[in-house]
Amino acid sequence: MTQINREWAISKLRDYIEVASITYVPDGPNSIGFWHYKLDKPKAEVQAATQIIEQVLDRTLPGWRTADWKEPARQPFWREREAAHRAVAQLEAEQELADNLGSGAPQLDASTLHPWVWGSVQGLWGSGHYRQAVGVAAVAVNAQAQAKVGRKDLSESKLLGDVFSTKDPEPGKPRLRLAPKEDSDTWRSRHEGAAAFARGVYAGIRNPIAHEAGDELEENEALEQLAAFSILARWIDTATVEKAP
């Protein structure tokens, strides 16, 4: 799970559980089968709170919308309350483990990834579609690279292998430069490395996602793959375009 403010999330979830509380209403005199549950708060207030809590649940308990939970009869907003209870229990357990067994290792916050990457996948990520999110990020980075160099004749690994080439630019074939050109092994290594890295992430990450059926990625694995595309995005974004005279 990416970093969240657990204490804040737990507080919001508990508030929602209170707002969305219900009361059992038994059958009236001389009637059978008309029992039900009613909301303790006005429905409009519960609906407004639900709009907010759904976003918290998407981050803390992906998959809650379609989870195979037993539905209680005649209880309004039952799924949201069930998810809120489960999310509180999960967050409290995570907080206890972090407080007592914290690894001390730094954590990667997805929101700090390059905006071409994270900005294109937030909705998918929040709903637990990690594999699809990585694919969308790859497409977004490619589109930005094509726009920057003004080329649509090539894409992905072929495009980036070409634009990071150490060869001089040609008409219709500009290059991306990570540093002013100079005759040094460091300059050549930097651009050859960028080209090789780009070919690697598209061949090793993007292509299997696009062309092979596979199980959903684990969140930590998908985050690592997003980070790889974020590195590439920053190189493309900060590079200067060198065109042929």
Image (cartoon, rainbow, N blue to C red):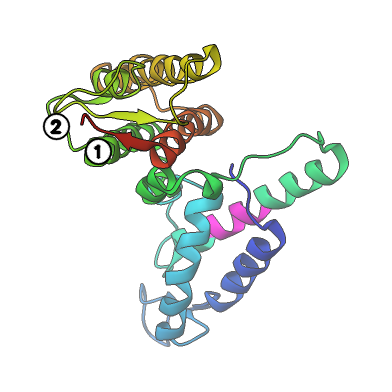
In the image, residue 77 lies at what x, y percent? 43, 67
Label 2's element? loop
Q: Is residue 93 above or below residue 169?
A: below
Which mark, by number, is residue 143?
A: 1
- Disc 1: CA contacts within 10 A as few (<14), some (14-19) or many (>=20): some
Q: Is residue 68 visible?
A: no
Magenta stretch holds residue 83: yes
Label 1's element? helix
Q: Residue at the spot x=51%, y=43% of the render?
A: 113
Left of 38 or right of it: where is 17? right
Magenta stretch holds residue 180: no
Quadrant location, the N terminus: top right
In the image, residue 224 lies at what x, y percent? 53, 29
Q: Where are the magenta residues, as a range?
A: 82-89
Q: Work out whether mark 2 precedes mark 1 in sequence or the reverse, and give the earlier one.
A: 1
> Disc 2 to disc 1, how far (Cα)?
9 Å
Left of 233 or right of it: where is 83? right
Dividing the picture into quarters, in which one does residue 168 lie?
Answer: top left
Q: Is residue 237 above or below residue 43?
A: above
